[in-house]
Image (tube, rainbow, N blue to C red):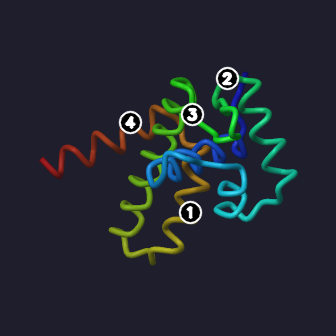
Amino acid sequence: MAMFESGEMYLETIYILSKKSSAVRGIDVGEYMGFSKPSVSRGIGLLKKDGFVETDESGYIKLTAKGRELAEKIYERHTILTSILISLGVDEKTAAEDACRIEHYISDTAFNAIKDHIKKYND
């Protein structure tokens, strides 16, 4: 199944929230993303169906290994792209917003080239 941008945004949000607390609920995801409860329920349901997340008996959301792997990849893209844009003189808010758009569409090839380029000049 191809992951859509909205699914990736949910995974990244769950990942970010799970770094702050081991108990992530749908309401937390909705507040963080500014989405309604029905939208979050549908999004989480689709991620659950595709094996990216699971919920426990209390309704807490956990990333599966598959979900964590993709969430970490998206988060890495977001943080690196944001840093690059800031280093180029873009303000932090705009850099984060633009990185969020770019992270979902940049190819692995292009992103890996960016990471290699950064490594070369930071080592």
Residue 39 in the figure: left or right of residue 4: right
Q: Evaluate if marks 2 and 3 touch, with contact meaning CB atoms under 8 Å apart.
A: no
The image shows residue 105 at horizontal and vertical percentages of 61, 43
- Give above or below for 105 relative to 94: above
- Location of the N terminus (image quadrant): top right
Is residue 87 toward the left or the right of residue 65 in the image? left
Earlier along the polypeptide chain: callout 3 or callout 4? Answer: 3
10 Å neighbourhood of mark 4: few (<14), some, or many (≥20)? few
User: Label 3 vs label 4: CA separation?
Assistant: 24 Å
Q: Hey, which residue is sitting farthest right in the picture?
A: 38
Mark 3 or 4: the one toward you: 3
Three-letter amino acid code at disc 4?
A: Asn
**Sequence-first tag of 1 and 2:** 2
- Dot placed on the residue nearer the N-terminal end, 2 or 3: 2
- Mark-to-mark CA distance, 3 and 1: 25 Å
- Tag 3 secondary structure: strand
Q: Judging from the image, what secondary structure is the residue with disc 1 in?
A: helix
List x then y, in percent, for residue 27.
Answer: 72, 56
Q: Label 1 is placed on what type of residue? A: Asp
Separation of disc 1 and disc 4 at Cα? 18 Å
- The Cα–Cα distance between marks 1 and 2, rounded to whole angstroms, is 29 Å
Which residue is pictured at 59% across the width and 48% down the height?
A: 24
Mark linked to residue 51: 2
Q: Earlier in the sequence, mark 1 or mark 4?
A: 1
Identified by mark 2, the residue type is Gly
Name the residue carrying label 3. 63
Sequence-wise, the earlier of marks 4 and 2 is 2
Q: CA distance from mark 4 to mark 2?
A: 26 Å
- Give the residue number, with chain letter if any, for mark 1: 98
Element assignment for label 4? helix
- Mark 1 vs mark 2, foreground winner is 2
**Numbered circle sitting on residue 112:** 4
